[in-house]
Amino acid sequence: MPTYTVEAFRWTGTYYNSQYNTSYQATFSDNDGAYQGGGDSDEQVQIDGGSFNSTASQPYKIAVSFTDTNGNSHVEDFNFFYTSDGGWYFVPEPDSEFTVGATLGSYQSHTVGWDYSDVVCFVSGTMIETPDGARPVESLRAGDLVTCAEGQTKPLAYVLKRAFSERQLERNEKLRPVRITAGAIGLGVPKRDLLVSRQHRMLVKSKISKNKFGQEDALVAAIKLTILPGIFLEPNIQDTTYYHLGFEDHEIVFAEGAPAESLLHGDDADLITSPEAQAELEWLLPFSNGTPTTPKPKTNIPSPSLQKTIVQAHLRKGRNLRK
């Protein structure tokens, strides 16, 4: 069954009008792309690598005021879920200004219903490095060899795709790709403009990451890079097809010469809408005695707040992301 991993904050015990100094990793196991709480008996959630427990109650999306760590005021939507392992938690939306250290304010309004909406994939036309040279991502098939980090070649387990219309992108900005212009990451990296989904993580080198994790390599979401010169949300809205490259393990591939992650099982299974594709992805996901497991990332994936800190440090010091 597909899994979805997010950063969450525990509301029970802290509540409104309080500072949140701890975040948790929540991993959902679900056979569809929507969180439904007590309305879905197949839905389970794991907190910080513990056991999977059932969900309950309603899938509330609640607008709440808060103050970020810089003292700025905001009102944003937060996705609430309930589990017998800890009670109520909430998940900030992608690109939220709510991070560890922020102070949650008061309830504003709510609706019922939310889904696992991250997308992690390449746009059609992207050139992917293979032992036989660069190939368009749309030409790749399961079994094809792809050049990965450290000079290794790995066979693709699957290639999945989903197309979005111009109208869909106009209605939902979060579906629009991020453009990384040639050389924006480092000298000659990427070789030409690269389009990826907002949550697609790129490999950067950072002393902040080394101080935190003991190694410089870190995977940072493309949307977090948009404060840097030459990286921005694509302004030209048009029909867009995203491709997912999946391997047996999480890998680092080269897209337009830039190191980027492959699909990390669990990040974006919600994009696979056909029953056939859902069945294929479910079959490929790792299981242990019927219990879903979270695959090990190829390298460090800092929390969203630390990713932001890493990028801000590079901007402040004028360093590219390969130094």
Image (tube, rainbow, N blue to C red):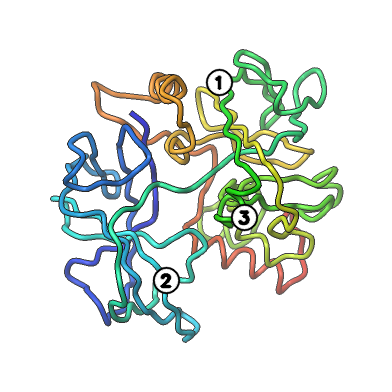
Amino acid type shown at disc 2: Glu
Quick one: quadrant of the N terminus? top left
Q: How crowded is mark 2: few (under 14 residues within 10 Å), some or many (20 or more)?
A: some
Q: Residues within 10 Å of mark 1 (few under 14, many from 20)?
A: some
Q: How far apart are marks 3 and 2 (CA)?
A: 20 Å
Q: Residues within 10 Å of mark 3 (few under 14, many from 20)?
A: few
Viewer-proximal residue among 159 and 48: 159
Q: Earlier in the sequence, mark 1 or mark 3?
A: 1
- Nearer the observer, disc 1 or disc 3? 3
Q: Residue at x 54, y 37 (%)?
A: 298
Q: Residue at x 54, y 19 (%)?
A: 157
Residue picked out by circle 2: 76
Q: Is residue 77 left or right of residue 291?
A: right
Indicate the position of residue 310 as horizontal and vertical percent values. Answer: 60, 64
Q: Quadrant of residue 78?
A: bottom left
Question: Residue 170's mark?
Answer: 3
SS type, badge 2: strand
Viewer-proximal residue among 323 and 28: 28
Amino acid type shown at disc 1: Tyr
Amino acid type shown at disc 3: Glu
Q: How far apart are marks 2 and 1 (CA)?
A: 36 Å
Q: In which quarter of the image is residue 128?
A: top right
Which residue sits furthest left? 84
Which residue sits furthest front? 167
Question: Residue 158's mark?
Answer: 1
Indicate the position of residue 111 as horizontal and vertical percent values. Answer: 30, 62
